[in-house]
Amino acid sequence: MPSAKRLLLVHAHPDDESINNGATMALYAAADAQVTLITCTRGEEGEVLVPALSHLASHEKDELGTHREVELANAMQALGVTDHRFLGAPGKKWRDSGMMGTPQNERPDTFWNADFDEAVAELVKVIEEVKPQVAITYDEFGGYGHPDHIQAHRITMAAVDRATWKVSKVYWNVMPRSVLKVAMDAMKEQGSDFFGAENIEDVPFAKPDELVTAVIHGDAYVDAKMNALKAHETQITVDGPFFALSNMLGQGVFGKEYYQLVHGLAAAPFDENGRETELFSGVRLD
């Protein structure tokens, strides 16, 4: 029998899901919800942070995408998620687009340069198969402006609109400014900046708190989220900001994940700030 609760997440690269939604995914997977992750590229243009694996980079052997497939599988095992797919696979596979204005971004096989209707149709297939009531993706800026994040947003919103199966609620990831300010201050106390930024205004993915309409309290799944992040070894260093913060702030930062409802109706339960605490609230479960 299909799960009563069915959640679809659409992300650009391996590791985006664990950073943004690791606790949420683990929480719902543990509650027997069907959690389906679609990753749009294999992250071939990612920066390799492990010196011993530097040969995988796109400017050397260009084997990073294959390696990151394994990292993603290990991360999903840590979160308890069994349904994770690449958009268009098997068959069509789009490449990491790199940042805007780079030579990599001009390649015809990148996700940014994908035939839009073709990519949307691939996601529609998944929606019709899985029949999710709730979907999660990025905002129109892709969180911080990466072309693949923006494209994932566009394709998700179009697929939800075109699919015969009607997704009841769509949420965008939100990184609230107040929460990131706490993390930034903690890093400064340790003599470090925060992902290269000195001030919260310099952090492109820090969003106004008033955009937050829902918060998931995944405090019990912080360890699972940390293990998923560790699985993405080429992208997130164990001695980097994420793990430094996990030791300093723990559940206060990593156990809560924030969302903005952009499609559908909010419903109880709400927290003291009027934010939903259950993504499936008000949704018909069938």
Image (cartoon, rainbow, N blue to C red):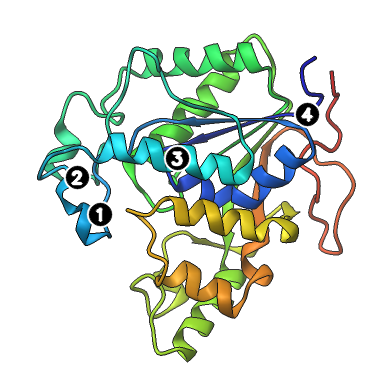
- Nearer the observer: mark 4 or 3; the answer is 3
Q: Secondary structure at mark 4?
A: loop
Residue 57 visible at all: no
Label 2 crowd bin: few (<14), some (14–19), many (20+), radius 10 Å: many
Q: Earlier in the sequence, mark 2 or mark 3?
A: 2
| In the image: residue 202, left or right of residue 263 | left
Q: Which residue was labeled with disc 1?
A: 48
At label 4, the amino acid type is Lys
Which mark is drawn over residue 72?
A: 3
Q: Nearer the viewer, residue 261 or 90?
A: 90
Q: Earlier in the sequence, mark 4 or mark 3?
A: 4
Q: Secondary structure at mark 2?
A: helix
Q: In the picture, which quadrant includes the N terminus?
A: top right
Query: CB under 8 Å between callouts 1 and 3?
Result: no
Q: Which residue was labeled with disc 2?
A: 56
Q: How much space separates mark 1 and mark 3, taking CA atoms?
A: 15 Å
Query: CB under 8 Å between callouts 2 and 1?
Result: yes
Q: Secondary structure at mark 3?
A: helix
Q: Residue at x 46, y 57 (%)?
A: 230
Q: Position of residue 152 (x, y in %)?
A: 44, 33
